[in-house]
Amino acid sequence: MSLKITLIGHATLLIEWNGLHILTDPNFSSRVLFFKRLEALRYDPAHLPKIDALLLSHAHYDHLDLFSYKYLPSDVPVFIPEGMSKAITHFVKNPVVELATWGRHTILDKLEICAVPAQHPGGRLFCRWRYPRCHGYVLTLDNESLYFAGDTAYRNDFTDLKNLFPIKTALLPAAQVYGSFYSRKRHMNIDDMIQCWSDLGSPDLIPYHWGSFFKIFNDPEKTEKVLRKKAAGDPLLAEKLHLLQNGESWIRHQIPNAV
């Protein structure tokens, strides 16, 4: 099956998979609240292909950027954590599909979307009790799965995902280079991300959530330096790590469908 992943920036990734197009946490704006984008957007959202599904992990402003929905037709279904519809439906006309944790939904009779747990405080601005749920998503097409982690700290149950789904590709957040004890309760640092990748069975790995905003946590140069150093000491990680700059794409060589 053909697969192309484009890192647009932060947690916005375009997944092009066997003719389907899935977009995650769209944010095309030049700032998040008072935080400016570290560099100009390298991908023009006006050139997005027809999107079949949009995955929204949670309500934080860097992931739910309502200004970015102007680039999306109103018929694109938006998948969100349960209880979050009012954060969307007051502002956009898109159909919204709320999923409980472990809830599943199939689109176009072939792509299954499963909402999976994420360890991250939700909320909107200073109201953590509003829209508190966070999700990652596992996409399954034919006999292959792709995992988009959303925003999450390291969890001890990532191995459960490996046992439940045939994950071949993992999109994981490198939200901080090192991180304090407190911050690691809400975000993975690079070591946590690599451990998560290992727990998932060492699939193809694309890190995101670095190099767009919040330089104090994920300085682009430091993040890239540490990731490349880790890969240099681990041949399997070096093979599986696809470290994309904003606007770059990774294309997997087409593999035949399982018989």
Image (tube, rainbow, N blue to C red):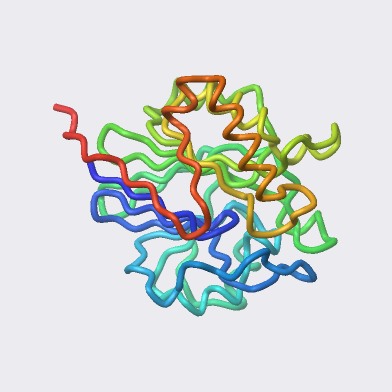
Residue 94 in the image: x percent, y percent? 47, 72
* Relative vertical location of residue 252 with respect to residue 72 in this rendering, above or below: above
* Relative vertical location of residue 183 with respect to residue 240 in this rendering, above or below: below
* Relative vertical location of residue 176 with respect to residue 30 in this rendering, above or below: above
Q: Quadrant of residue 185?
A: top right
Numbered-mark total: 0
Could you tell me if residue 90 is visible in this image? yes
Residue sitting at 54 percent across and 77 percent down? Answer: 92
Residue sitting at 59 percent across and 70 percent down? Answer: 40
Residue sitting at 61 percent across and 42 percent down? Answer: 224
Residue 51 in the image: x percent, y percent? 36, 65
Camera-nearest residue between 204 and 40: 40
Where the C terminus falls, by quadrant?
top left
Could you tell me if residue 115 is visible in this image? no
* Relative vertical location of residue 95 with respect to residue 236 in this rendering, above or below: below
Where the N terminus falls, by quadrant?
top left
Q: Quadrant of residue 52?
A: bottom left
Residue 8 in the image: x percent, y percent? 50, 60
Camera-nearest residue between 60 and 131: 60
Camera-nearest residue between 196 and 105: 196
Camera-nearest residue between 132 and 37: 37
Residue 149 in the image: x percent, y percent? 56, 41
